[in-house]
Amino acid sequence: GNPGCAVQVTQVTTLTLPVAMLIAGIAATLLVPRLNLYKSRKMTRGKLVSFARTESAKAALPAVEIHAFESSKPLAFSQASSTGRIFISIGMMETLTQKELEAVVLHEMEHLRRSTPLFKASTILYRLFSPISADGAFNSSLVAEERIADEYAAKMQGTDRYLRSAKKKAG
């Protein structure tokens, strides 16, 4: 092998890694939240909103907002902000039972409590900009965060039945 090639790869990696991380951080903190808010509507009443308010108080979180967005796919994610926001697709709301939706909200609340949304968004964007991001450490960290959020939802509901059922329906 050509030692010059290895040096070039190392130099490119050393230079692109900080730039990719900076771009991912800026996008995750500035652009993605605005896009999510633009594409959704804040729910102000209903069982799920009341549930989120009660549970966020129990978790010592500021009042969590529930936002609905147009998508037939069953999707949900959270976004850190001054309050914390949970985004749930119309498709998910139409597919899941109330208890399953509550399990999803609890799962996402744990992400908010642990400040996972920024980490997840940065990691996803970082993967787009960096060729070395396919590293297993990123994937194992995301899997661990999902497991912790699942365990929290199951603990708060006293069973993992609703979360398992929601995941099965969501595909």
Image (spheres, rainbow, N blue to C red):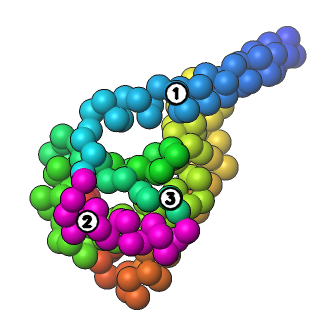
Give left or right: position of 77 versus 23: left
**For the residue labelled by badge 3, is the local secondary structure a helix, a strand or a loop?**
loop
Measured as percent of width and height from the top left, residue 109 is found at 46, 62
> Which label sits in the foreground, 3 or 1?
3
> Which label sits in the foreground, 2 or 3?
3
The type of residue carrying mark 2 is Leu
Measured as percent of width and height from the top left, residue 64 is found at 42, 57
Q: Residues within 10 Å of mark 1 (few under 14, many from 20)?
A: few
How would you classify the magenta stretch by its main secondary structure? helix
Taking the spot 56% from the left edge, 52% from the top edge, the residue there is: 116
Calculate the distance from the C-alpha at mark 3 to the C-alpha at mark 1. 21 Å
Kindly identify which numbered label has been placed on residue 62. Answer: 3
Residue 51, magenta (yes or no):
yes
Kindly identify which numbered label has been placed on residue 113. Answer: none
The type of residue carrying mark 1 is Leu
The type of residue carrying mark 3 is Pro
Residue 99, magenta (yes or no):
no
Measured as percent of width and height from the top left, residue 8 is found at 80, 13
Q: How crowded is mark 3: few (under 14 residues within 10 Å), some or many (20 or more)?
A: some
Toward the viewer: 105 or 73? 105
Quarter containing the C terminus:
bottom left
Calculate the distance from the C-alpha at mark 2 to the C-alpha at mark 1. 28 Å
Residue 149 visible from this viewpoint: no
Whether the residues at callouts 2 and 1 have beta carbons within 8 Å, the answer is no
**For the residue labelled by badge 2, is the local secondary structure a helix, a strand or a loop?**
helix
Calculate the distance from the C-alpha at mark 2 to the C-alpha at mark 3. 16 Å
Residue range in magenta is 44-60
Residue at the spot of label 1: 30
Residue at the spot of label 2: 48
